[in-house]
Image (cartoon, rainbow, N blue to C red):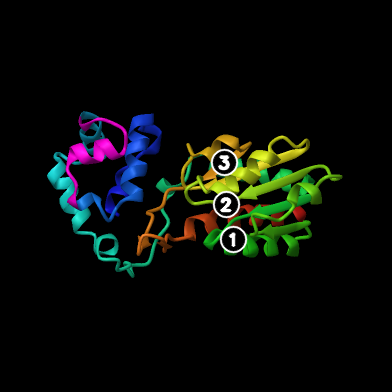
């Protein structure tokens, strides 16, 4: 959806975020809804919806809804085949410093666990393999029922890297919530929402911005390229520290 590119998340209030999350999760309905209906469903007000729409660059609700309707990849369920590109605006300004700090901590860790489900799980497998090649004791966890707390019971200096586009995946939140109580545990969240529940639990957040694509309501075609870029960059810094 093209309106995602107009958003500066740092300027959004809690009410704005509620509206944003409703719009992004119900993109198939929005082109046919009134302002009042969006306000009711997002538990906000009509005036708040209109302020949000103007904040992201539209002069009227009609202009916003017209552009929403024009996005065939969402309304008709057809995925855009245009190749996604990376831009500096998708990442925080202090990204390099943050990656350096996390990479140095990885070097000191006895265990590095990447945790993700679905498409994020495949990313975890890939990055865990890269870290293992570099000599890190890293592995991917893609099963939310895996007894991770028991496995790490008698260990120290552990890092868990939960990967979730929304930062709101229930299974991931439950696991991470339990791990935050463990001693010598560092949580590094990788997500597209810096204000998500997952981000709030983490010691460090590697956040990015990406358009979310879903077809048939549940099938996720959101690009993992920004996420992979962050994690590959992290492993490259680890490699440079290991030399």
* Image side of residue 11 versus residue 227, left or right: left
Which mark sits nearer the N-terminus, 1 or 2? 1
Instruction: Using the image, tell me which numbered label, if any, was put on residue 163.
Output: 2
Disc 2 packing (10 Å; few <14; some 14–19; many ≥20): many
- Are dots 2 and 3 in contact, CB under 8 Å? no
In magenta, the rendered stretch is 32-46
Q: Secondary structure at mark 3?
A: strand
Of the two numbered discs 1 and 3 on the same chain, state the one appearing first in sequence.
1
Q: Mark 3 highlights which residue? A: 205
Residue 27 position (above or below residue 204): below
Q: Are marks 1 and 2 in contact (CB under 8 Å)?
A: yes
| Structural distance between the alpha carbons of marks 1 and 3 | 18 Å
| Magenta run includes residue 221 | no
Q: Name the quadrant containing residue 145.
A: bottom right
**Labelled disc at residue 121:** 1
Q: CA distance from mark 1 to mark 2?
A: 8 Å
Q: Residue at x 22, y 53 (%)?
A: 68
Give coordinates of residue 99: x percent, y percent. 61, 45
Among numbered discs 2 and 3, the one appearing first in the sequence: 2
Check the picture and name the quadrant holding the C terminus. bottom right
- Is label 1 in a helix, a strand or a loop? helix
The answer to which image quadrant residue 213 occupies is: bottom left
Magenta: main secondary structure: helix
Element under label 2? loop
């Amino acid at each position: 959806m093209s309106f995602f590119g107009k958003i500066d998340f740092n300027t959004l209030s809690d009410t704005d975020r509620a509206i944003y999350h409703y719009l992004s999760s119900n993109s198939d309905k929005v082109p046919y809804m009134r302002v009042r209906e969006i306000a009711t469903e997002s538990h906000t007000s009509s005036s708040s919806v209109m302020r949000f729409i103007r904040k992201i660059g539209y002069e009227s609700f009609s202009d916003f809804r017209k552009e929403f309707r024009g996005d065939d990849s969402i309304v008709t369920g057809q995925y855009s085949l245009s190749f996604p590109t990376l831009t500096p605006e998708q990442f925080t300004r202090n990204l390099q410093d943050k990656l350096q700090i996390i990479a140095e901590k990885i070097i000191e860790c006895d265990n590095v666990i990447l945790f993700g489900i679905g498409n994020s799980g495949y990313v975890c497998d890939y990055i865990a393999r890269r870290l293992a090649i570099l000599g890190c004791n890293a592995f991917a966890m893609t099963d939310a029922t895996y007894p991770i707390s028991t496995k790490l019971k008698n260990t120290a200096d552990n890092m868990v890297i939960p990967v979730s586009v929304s930062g709101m995946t229930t299974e991931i939140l439950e696991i991470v919530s339990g791990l935050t109580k463990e001693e010598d545990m560092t949580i590094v969240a990788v997500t597209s929402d810096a204000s998500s529940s997952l981000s709030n639990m983490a010691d460090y957040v590697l956040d990015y911005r990406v358009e979310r694509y879903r077809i048939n309501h549940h099938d996720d075609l959101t690009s993992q390229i920004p996420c992979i870029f962050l994690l590959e960059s992290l492993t490259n810094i680890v490699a440079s520290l290991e030399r």
